[in-house]
Amino acid sequence: MSKQNIRNFSKEEIGEYLESIGEKKFRLQQIWEWLWQKHAFDFQSMSNLSKELRTNLEEKFTLPSLSIDTTQVSEDGTVKSRFKTHDGFKVEGVLIPTAERLTACVSSQIGCSLSCKFCATGFMERERNLSFDEIYDEVVLLNQQAMRIYKKKLTNIVFMGMGEPLLNYKNVLKSIERITAPDGLGMGSRRITVSTAGVSKMIRQLGDDQVKFKLAVSLHAPNDKKRNEIMPINETNDLKTLIDALNYFYKQTKSEITFEYILFDNFNDSLEDAAELMKIYRQVPADLVNIIEYNPIEFARFKKPAEEKTEAFMQFLDKNRVNARLRKSRGKDIDAACGQLANK
């Protein structure tokens, strides 16, 4: 039989295997710690196991893991890493430092199938989903970078890298289970945000699963006509369906939603657009609208609005008691900002 990834097995299943080869019970805890807390990327690094046990594990299981292929550092301290998977694919993750926090922006898919017209990843093919342990490895590697460069651990994780997290539902949820588990990374659920382009069926599923992490929705247009133009997903998940799903999610979890809204010059940045955005905000239990600076990419026709237009847009929202915040781009100079990840 072909060898299987040891991280796909439960603690109980690994325990049964150890029993079958006559190993003492305490070995299970040691192996589990190497897999999920000490982050061994091969069996030979498990230094407190006997040589014979390490060889047995190597003959029975595999331990595929991500490695850092290359790293770039921005003028503002943002670090972009390109990770390499065991089967040779490349995927990107970003470490974003600010005064108050260190955030890991992680990917959930290699490429993306949603083809959003403003996003570099949307112009790539979706090669495959990342497995839950690959997503976990992204966080581990970014945390190690944070410790090395900034002498601090990660404070937050956002699933805002490459891919649509809710189209890799099981792996994303299982990775979060391991990230938050006391015998994993032990991170608080409320420090994790999953961002979706609006897969309504899976937003309802999040509600049914009573998830504890935060949910963000990439809105980027205030009506169906404009959203259809830039986000093909809207043709099958229109705004009414999305709003209904978000209200269902809130009813099940009591967790408020964050909206993400990129401003595009002469497309969605008028005061009429701001008024329509305000109406959507009032139909959903939203805690915040993140207004995001557009980061140009070579394939897209969009531009960033002039500062006066952005200011007028923000003032309108403020005057109408919409809790909105202008999010400045980080890592633009190394193509690490929102919408720029494309394995360049």
Image (cartoon, grey):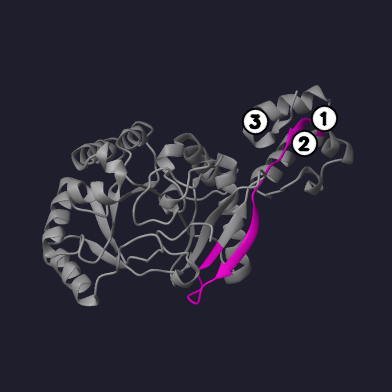
Q: CA distance from mark 3 to mark 1?
A: 17 Å
Q: Are marks 2 and 1 in contact (CB under 8 Å)?
A: yes
Residue 23 % position (x, y): 82, 30
Callout 1 secondary element: loop
Tell me the quarter of the image containing the N terminus: top right
Asked if one can make out residue 254 in the rendered structure from this viewpoint, the answer is: no
Kindly report which numbered mark, 3 or 1, lies closer to the viewer in this rendering: 3
* Crowd around label 3: few <14 · some 14–19 · many ≥20 (10 Å): few
Q: Is residue 96 left or right of residue 329?
A: right
Between the C-alphas of marks 2 and 1, the distance is 7 Å
The label on residue 27 is: 2
Numbered circle sitting on residue 9: 3
Q: Amino acid at mark 2?
A: Arg
Asked if residue 65 is among those painted magenta in the image, a careful observer would answer: yes
The tally of labels here is: 3
Q: Amino acid at mark 1?
A: Glu
Q: Which residue: 83% across, 25% down?
A: 21
Viewer-proximal residue, 241 or 254? 241
Mark 3 / mark 2, whichever is N-terminal: 3
**Could you tell me residue 61's position as x and y percent?**
74, 33
Quickly name the residue at label 1: 23
